[in-house]
Amino acid sequence: MSNHATLDRESLNGPGLAAAGPRVDVAAVARQAGLVGVIVVLVLGFGLARPLFLDGGNLINVLLQSSVVGVLALGQTFVLITGGIDLSIGSTVAMAAVVSGLLSHAVPAPVAILGGIAVGALAGLANGLLITMTKITPFIITLGTMSIYAGLALIIAGGQAVYDIPAAFQDLLAGRVLGIPIPVLLFVLLTVVAAVCLRRTVFGEHLTAVGGNAEVARLAGINVKRFTASAYVLSGATAGLAGTILVARLGAADPTLGADLLLTAIAATVMGGTKLAGGEGSMSGAAFGAIIIATLTAGLTTLNVQAFYQQVAVGAAIIIALLVDQLARGRR
Amino acid sequence: MTTDPPVLEIKKLSKSFPSVRALHEVDLTAYPGEIHALLGENGAGKSTLLKTLFGVQRPDSGEVWFEGERREFAQPSDALAAGLAMVHQELSLVPQFTAVQNIVLGREKSRAGFVDRGEARLRAARSLARLGFDARIDVPVHKLSVAQQQLVEIARALAVGARLIILDEPTASLTTQESERLFELLRRLRAEGRAIIYVSHRLAEVMELSDRVTVLRDGELVGTRTRGQIADESELVKLMVGRDVAAVGVRGDPGDPGAAGEEVLRVEGLSSTEGVSDCSLSVRRGEIVGLAGMVGAGRTELVRTLIGADRATGGTVWIRGERIHIGSPAEAVRAGIAFLPEDRKHQGLVLHMSAASNATLIRPPRRHGMLDRREQREQTRALLKRLNANISPDYPVGKLSGGTQQKVVLARWLKTSSDIFIFDEPTRGIDVGAKGEIHALMRELADEGKAIVMVSSDLLEVLGMSDRVLVMRRGRIVAELDRSAMSEEAIVHHAAAT
């Protein structure tokens, strides 16, 4: 019996592992597969109860519903990876919406849209600079700017919604290409771009290192402040884009937009496997998270479940998702 | 000593994890009034044994008998209540709480629903005083030194009336003097009839302090010996490693000091807000300069200031004869200075990133503007092979042993082809076998013409590796010893002189 009892050190740290291959990726792929599985189960489940739910037009509509939250979740993922949080994105959406709405009356639609995105990026830059130049935590800074940006949105809009958004503006962001709504296309495209940026660029690699351990990154000569700040700029820019999409879809720019978008976006992000502690995150996960929440909301609506109950269900889904994730991690 | 019944008897304890058998039928007995050393390389099963004993993990099979009764501690608080306390290597105090609050934590007495601070203070002060605690008891413990914090932990153990105290590498971050005081205290606790189980990598200490020694290797019991049965440290090493190993770190084979080349690094009058004051030093190609001194003497602060991690308030640095300003670690990297921090887990590695990501953290390989994962893997594989670390580049570094982790950090700097290597406690927490390898690699780097600065609290390491030793005290370099003047006595003398 004694010959099988030896556990040599080599098997702990040694060549055995070389054969084990890329473990990191296996876990990540398993989580993504799990999220897709959840979407499929939800769609089929709601489809069984209400066959109309499976109609192609309806499914596309669900994707359309998820696209604004999804775009926000992508930006938030960059921030969460650095170990921070951006609470101001909802207000940034409102500010960008109002600015692009007002601009749309004066300048060509593409310029107005770029203006909205630029306002978002500027708001993000302000967050990033405040966070990196002071020692105040991101939570507090963005809690402050959340209120500031919300107020600015109301001030800029003069306290009321901006109406009469030109058709050219609406067509550009809310139209369809080959039957697919442009926001959905943008959402998919941005997910791919963000995922590539995170996993396949030096920027993404260094951002992950900064979030995983800022001191290690700093000692390795990485400019921690610049990377941290740029995550907020990206988050602000996606909020700006989300704001302009909403203006195009609604045909009006409401300065009180966006309050409920913040929590949904963070929920989608963490559901997708991004850790609030930083250093770990997934863009496709955030996108799937947004789609899960939209599917759940849409499905419950077709089942005539009241909005109040929907809120409860979505909240429960978030907690269950993280619980399952944690159990799966514990097993490994 | 052995006439009393044992306090603790562990019988055939086994514990497996999904991929690893961590413990296999291990026995351990501790008697009242003995200091019992528990030895083994990293991964030998020491911490699993202690965690299982302490109720952090459940054993798969085997029995624990405490004071004549069979016990199964389901959680640490059960073990504590029974009279078994553990002083963890990474101290487990609430940093914002005072010594008093920490000592009574979980056992606060209340009067009319309010915490009774008077009573708590009195009890805590009493137990601290017994231990020779000389700091204020009403400041947050994070303001205390590691040694003082450790005393708070021991006081907590005594306050619950522990009859068995387990110390996990208690001297890992203590100075020689502080260690001596701890040993005195442990001897006193022994005289009171308490049993002490003591985990350490420092074999000299084990020889000095323990009555009996139990050695684990690869999850199995190698054996228990009384102090009298062990001739010397190398016998312990042999038991731990299971083969003959040249006593590590002791009088290595230092390069010929005459062979050292031109001056690569010159520092004059370096000072910082962190207590470094007017430090000057010079390191030549092919030379290993040891930086010795007590913990808190400012050695880590000096090297951190040098690389721009802490702010310098004065001083001049020349590299290869060129005067340069290093205001940030990024500038140090560009100037060709490699820094391997003492705290690998918090300063050296991003733990959940792969070995490849960590090894190529500085200037990752690019292709068409994108990160080249394949090249990243290839580079890492080559570097790790050179360092004799046979692991997959995709493996998360958090799960590697201390020695392999250090190699990954080293790989990062080999890739930058730095000229100057600064090692801060290069082998802390690294097991005996890997220690020798790290030392050999450092020597190799010196032979390749790198200039090396090594901060170390391990005197044997300082003596064995250094061509020259600088001794620091209170932020200043107070002595420079060449090979002929280097000795334990000389270093301790300069480090401690007041």
Image (cartoon, coloured by chain):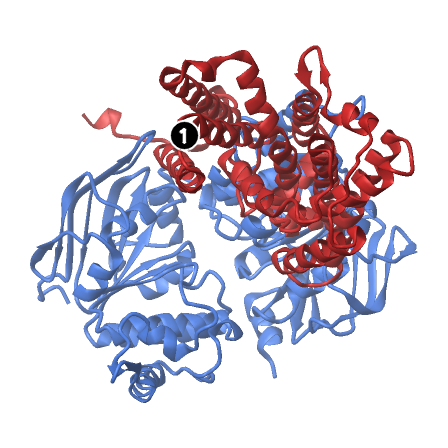
Above-or-below relation of B283 to B311: above
Element type at mark 1: loop
Q: Which residue is found at the position 36% from the left and 65% from the top?
A: B208
Classify residue B412 as left or right of residue B352: right
Q: Quadrant of the C terminus of chain A?
A: top left
Q: What residue is drawn where x is 25% and y is 48%?
A: B52
Colour given to chain A in the rendered image:
red
- The front one of B169 and B100 is B100
Residue B444 seen: no
Q: How many marks?
A: 1
Residue B118 placed where, x, y %? 32, 89
- Give the percent coordinates (x, y) of residue A257: 66, 45
Q: Position of residue A318 (x, y in %)?
A: 44, 39
The shade of chain B is blue
Residue located beneath label 1 in the image:
A304
User: Which amino acid type is marked by label 1?
Assistant: Asn
* Up/down of B56 relative to B102, above or below: above
Describe residue A89's horizontal placement relative to residue B458 as left or right. Answer: right
Kindly identify which chain the residue marked by label 1 belongs to: A
Q: Position of residue B11 (x, y in %)?
A: 14, 46
Q: Nearer the viewer, residue B221 or B132?
A: B132
Examine the rendered structure and indicate whether residue B296 appears above or below residue B266.
below
Residue B498 visible in the snapshot: yes
